[in-house]
Amino acid sequence: QVQLVESGGGLVQPGGSLRLSCAALGSILSINDMEWHRQAPGKDRELVARITRGNITTYPDSVKGRFTISRDIAKNTVSLQINSLKPEDTARYYCSAEILAAGSGYVEVWGQGTLVTVSS
């Protein structure tokens, strides 16, 4: 069984920065794309960053220039650096990954999320 565990959320003032981390745990053979999503209260979950195994990154226009996704393939981790935080960035942030685990094919795994609150 594999799982994703996020960390790094918290309360931050507008204009501040946060770094979210996500670790994939378990009998992992390989990980393809890794992503960060967020869901604000009353809104749909949205993709905010994707990184491929080849380190190609994509972002929606709403966060481009402020969010940076990175990964460490050897450590099975993915991070999200968020700068110039805005109140509208307040949301629960989730990481997801397409993981090849021992004894199974590729499966999409989601973490439990970490809460980011931007407020003065």
Image (cartoon, grey):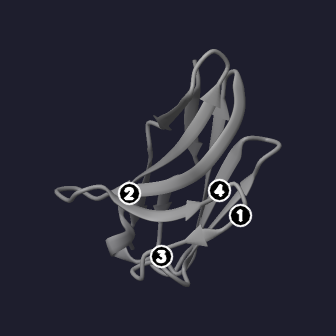
Residue found 39% across the figure and 80% down from its top: 62
Read off the residue under disc 3. Answer: 85
Is disc 3 in contact with disc 2, using a CB cutoff of under 8 Å? no
Does dot 1 land on a helix, a strand or a loop? loop
Q: Which mark is nearer the camera, 3 or 2?
A: 2
- Relative to 114, is 17 above or below? below
Mark 4 burial class by Cα count in 10 Å: few <14, some 14-19, many 20+: many
Q: Nearer the viewer, residue 34 or 4?
A: 34
Q: Is residue 91 visible?
A: no
- N-terminal of the two: label 3 or label 2? 2
Amino acid on which disc 2 is placed: Arg
Could you tell me residue 80's position as x and y percent? Answer: 60, 61
Amino acid on which disc 3 is placed: Leu
Read off the residue under disc 1. Answer: 55
Mark 1 burial class by Cα count in 10 Å: few <14, some 14-19, many 20+: some
Could you tell me residue 46's position as x and y percent? Answer: 34, 61
Residue found 54% across the figure and 75% down from its top: 16
Mark 3–mark 2 Cα distance, whole angstroms, equals 14 Å
Mark 3–mark 1 Cα distance, whole angstroms, equals 24 Å
| Extreme-front residue of the structure | 105
Read off the residue under disc 4. Answer: 79
Residue found 64% across the figure and 35% down from its top: 24
- N-terminal of the two: label 3 or label 1? 1
| Extreme-left residue of the structure | 42
- N-terminal of the two: label 2 or label 1? 2
Mark 2–mark 1 Cα distance, whole angstroms, equals 21 Å
Q: Quadrant of the C terminus?
A: bottom left
